[in-house]
Amino acid sequence: MTLIEATILGIIQGFTEFLPISSSGHLVLGQAILGIDQPGNEFEILVHLGTLASVLVVFFDDIKSLLFSLTSKKTQTFILFILIGTLPAVFVGLGFKALLKSLFENVAAVGGALIFTGVVLYGSSFAKRQNKDHSYFTAILIGCAQAVAIIPGISRSGMTISAALFLGLSSKEAARFSFLLAIPAISGAGILTALDVGDGFQLPITVAVAGILSSFVVGVVALKWLLGWLEKGKFHYFGIYCFVVGLITLVL
């Protein structure tokens, strides 16, 4: 993988991580289109770290507020919900590690997953807009939605935000919970991959840095854009895109 290819894939990651169109799926398709032979998901995890930094920047005030109110019962409960929501992804990620790794090299599977994402996203437009509070039940179900999104082609933000909307959370709170939930999920995935790679890390450091930096910068822009679209009720529009791209992937 060259420096330019890493930058291009980092840009793809930055846009698609937060726009609910599956970053992992687009990275698989991007590598296939560019003819990049990068086995496994090593690079995919690296650029996820760049977008993790994007979340920390955009939601800095929320994170700071949580850190400075750790003694509050409300904050402690919210953090507990985040931890509960993280567990399903941990179980799926560890329990189906080999299968999930093989899917990162299966373009047809990505196409089918994108179609599934499209259906769910468009279906979220029929969810009743309410302002319900979080509960253990909502935390578990949103966590399960995140676990399903480990499959490349299924959008993590798309699944978690859609699940939150179906469960009656407001669009603003759905986005907030989704992206705060991403912090332990992406961090954990990065740690597991680093341990798995060990001394076998194949990417040059310049290529890795290019991917991380490009995904970070573009990720900040994309995240702010998504939050604006979500407030305007245009979230489900991304479902049409996913459905079309999925069909094209299967046909071609």
Image (cartoon, rainbow, N blue to C red):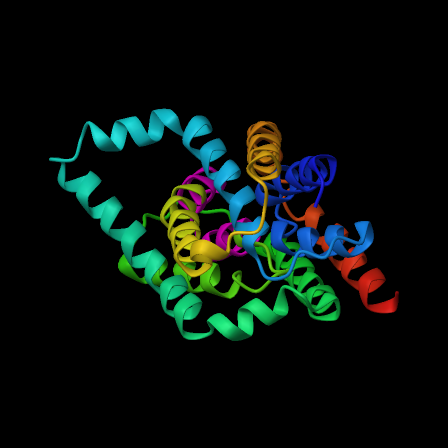
**Front residue (pair 214, 71):** 214
Q: Residue at 40% of width from left, 59% of height from top?
A: 143
- At which x and y percent is residue 6? 67, 40
**Front residue (pair 233, 79):** 79
Q: Is residue 158 magenta?
A: yes
Predominant secondary structure in magenta?
A: helix
Left or right relative to 20: residue 46? left
- The residue sitting at the left extreme is 71
Q: Residue at 42% of width from left, 69% of height from top?
A: 92
Residue 192, image quadrant: bottom left
Give the quarter of the figure containing the C terminus.
Answer: bottom right
- The residue sitting at the right extreme is 252
* One can see residue 148 in this view: yes
The vertical placement of 237 against 192, above or below, is: above
Magenta stretch?
157-178
Left or right relative to 26: residue 20? left
Left or right relative to 57: residue 110? right
Q: Residue at 61% of width from left, 61% of height from top?
A: 152
- At which x and y percent is residue 11? 67, 36
